[in-house]
């Protein structure tokens, strides 16, 4: 999850001349009050002040779920401000109708909760971007093709009918352990969460056999004004942590299919732990 993945992707896009075909925006850093639109004040204050040498209280670490998966490192808060600012600025571009498609491969950190870190994710840029989109759009669809369940985003919008979350993920003795097919929302948001649990080794054909009819029905029934697609590349074959068997073209077909509905679209990154495959995949999807 180190930023080197994003540097590799950016470099590949540059060498293929793709950056010249797009408007490249230098995002503003997200401010602490921007992060507090979703996260609690005390959690944001902790991230702001956290340094490896000052994290000596194990109770504080446990409270905010600072573990081996989510260590404190130098310039942690600046890292969070950077990728979150990019996702929020991308949402603003869609709100202003300045673009049809916006891309932030450094975003997509879908596990972060309101007051704790989880699974390499500290700030949930996706939730903050969707909240920004909701200022100008009545309904936002969130689709997640990372191998891990998009639990942080689902939990954030579990009780609303303005956001539908659809997650395709490995289920059963696999992090984060959520995303059962019967988990489908609560209260006003009942049936606005869709979970598609999958087994090891699923290939392109089997994946699209599920993905396309489900997404087609969701688009028909929910009729979103904007779509956010988390393109975690750990669902690719050969990933160091993943166990699916998708090709780069198969992964990208999900992007192409959602693009075909001609609805404003935000593409975000996510997981992906075989670095060369991550950069190849996201470059191909651009």
Image (spheres, helix red, strand yellow):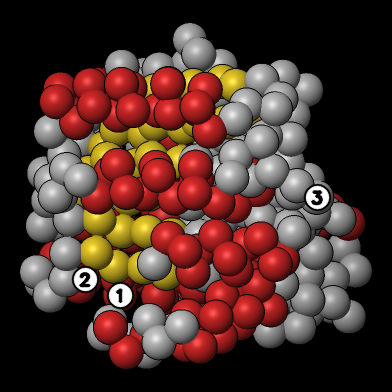
Q: Which residue is mark 1?
A: 89
Disc 2, SS:
helix
| Viewer-nearest of discs 3 and 2 | 3
Q: Position of residue 32 (x, y in %)?
A: 45, 75
Whether 164 is drawn above or below 134: the answer is above
Q: Badges 3 and 1: C-beta atoms under 8 Å apart?
A: no
Q: Badges 1 and 2: C-beta atoms under 8 Å apart?
A: yes
Q: Position of residue 20 (x, y in %)?
A: 32, 89
- Quadrant of the rendered image containing residue 95: bottom left
Q: Position of residue 239 (x, y in %)?
A: 74, 49
Q: Which residue is mark 3?
A: 240
Does 110 sit left or right of 191 as displayed? right
Q: Residue lying furthest top in this view?
A: 182
Could you tell which of marks 3 and 1 lies nearer the N-terminus?
A: 1
Q: In 3D space, how far apart are the residues under numbered discs 3 and 2 (Cα atoms)? A: 35 Å
Disc 1, SS:
helix
Q: In 3D space, how far apart are the residues under numbered discs 1 and 2 (Cα atoms)? A: 5 Å
Q: Which mark is residue 281?
A: none
Whether 117 is drawn above or below 195: the answer is below
Disc 3, SS:
loop
Q: Badges 3 and 2: C-beta atoms under 8 Å apart?
A: no
In front here: 45 or 70?
Answer: 70
Q: Position of residue 40 (x, y in %)?
A: 50, 56
- Quadrant of the rendered image containing residue 156: top left
Q: Residue at x 12, y 75 (%)?
A: 98
Q: Which residue is mark 2?
A: 92
User: Considering the image in quadrants, where does the C terminus appear?
Assistant: bottom left
Q: Residue at x 50, y 13 (%)?
A: 181
Q: Residues within 10 Å of mark 3 (few under 14, many from 20)?
A: few
Could you tell which of marks 3 and 2 lies nearer the N-terminus?
A: 2
């Amino acid at each position: 999850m180190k930023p080197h993945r994003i540097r590799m992707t950016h470099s590949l896009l540059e060498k293929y001349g793709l950056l010249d075909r797009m408007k490249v925006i230098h995002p503003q850093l997200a401010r602490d009050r921007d992060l507090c639109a979703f996260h609690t004040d005390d959690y944001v204050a902790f991230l702001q002040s956290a340094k490896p040498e000052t994290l000596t209280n194990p109770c504080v670490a446990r409270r905010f779920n600072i573990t081996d998966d989510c260590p404190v490192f130098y310039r942690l808060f600046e890292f969070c401000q950077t990728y979150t600012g990019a996702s929020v600025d991308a949402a603003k571009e869609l709100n202003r109708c300045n673009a049809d498609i916006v891309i932030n491969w450094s975003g997509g950190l879908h596990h972060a909760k309101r007051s704790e870190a989880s699974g390499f994710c500290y700030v949930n840029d996706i939730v903050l971007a969707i909240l920004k989109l909701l200022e100008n759009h009545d309904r936002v669809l969130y689709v997640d093709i990372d191998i891990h369940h998009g639990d942080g985003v689902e939990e954030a919008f579990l009780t609303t009918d303005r956001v539908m979350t659809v997650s395709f993920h490995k289920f059963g003795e696999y992090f984060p352990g959520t995303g059962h097919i019967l988990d489908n929302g609560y209260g006003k948001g009942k049936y606005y969460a869709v979970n598609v649990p999958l087994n090891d080794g699923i290939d392109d054909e089997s994946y699209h056999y599920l993905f396309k009819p489900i997404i087609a029905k969701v688009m028909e029934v929910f009729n979103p004004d904007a779509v956010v697609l988390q393109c975690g590349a750990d669902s690719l074959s050969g990933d160091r942590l993943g166990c699916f068997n998708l090709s780069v073209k198969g992964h990208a077909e999900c992007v192409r299919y959602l693009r075909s509905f001609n609805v404003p679209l935000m593409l975000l990154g996510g997981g992906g732990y075989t670095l060369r495959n991550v950069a190849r995949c996201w470059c191909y999807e651009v």
